[in-house]
Amino acid sequence: MPTTDQIKRYILLVDDDANDRELAQIVITELAQEAGAHPEVRIMSSGQEALEFLKTHAQETDQLPDVVLLDLNMPQMDGFSVLRAIRENPTTSTLPVVILSTSRERADVQQSYAQGANAYVVKPLEYDHFRRTISSVMEFWTGQNQVNR
């Protein structure tokens, strides 16, 4: 089992849109560095890829991400299915999951929380607004890591 100093902290970003992934990674990295943190951002472009990664990585390294940023609207396996699978797996059931979605639909927000999402953030398309939004997620991430150290 790795010691706390050996554990590589990371954030898992799951989104099928390349532009949204790129923008989120840039903003997360900027904000983390401003806070003195240096998380690795692992990027997955599909729900299936993310679940396979979580299963394999957890078995191989005994490490899970500190937080999962999850898009809802993805082809083949939507974010609700991914969230449900995360919550049903005893290894990942307590993993913090933040929904990052363009959907403002009340039903999507309610369903996300009903399935165990820790937070729901609407993805704006404008950089400065997106940066402010992600900043609130990073405050959560930084807080998690202060407690875990």
Image (cartoon, rainbow, N blue to C red):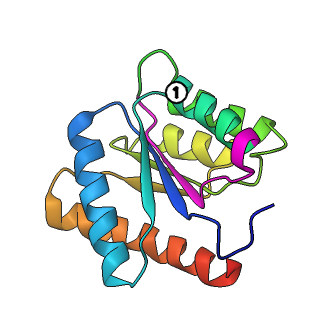
Provide residue 60's location: percent of width, then percent of height.
Answer: 71, 41
Quadrant of image for the N terminus: bottom right
**Disc 1 marks which residue?**
49
| Residue 53 position within the rendered picture, expressed as x and y whole percent measured from the top left | 59, 34
Q: Residue at x 24, y 47 (%)?
A: 22
Question: In the figure, residue 48 lies in which quadrant?
Answer: top right
**Residue 56 picture location, percent across and down:** 67, 34
**Which quadrant would the C terminus be assigned to in this image?**
bottom right
**Residue type at numbered disc 1:** Glu
Horizontal side, residue 46 vs residue 59: left or right: left
Residue 133 falls inside the magenta stretch: no
Horizontal side of residue 106 vs 33, given as left or right: right
Residue positioned 53% across, 73% down in the render: 140
Which residue corresponds to the image point at 33% horizontal and 77% vertical from the top-left?
A: 33
The answer to whether residue 62 is magenta is yes
Does 1 appear above or below 69?
below
- Nearest the camera: 76 or 62? 62
Q: Would residue 135 be found to the left or right of residue 92 on screen?
A: left
Image vertical order of residue 2 relative to residue 149, above or below: above
Q: Residue furthest right?
A: 90
* 63 left or right of 138 in image: right
Q: Give, as a single range, the part of the protein colored magenta.
A: 59-73
- Residue 23, percent from left and from top: 23, 52
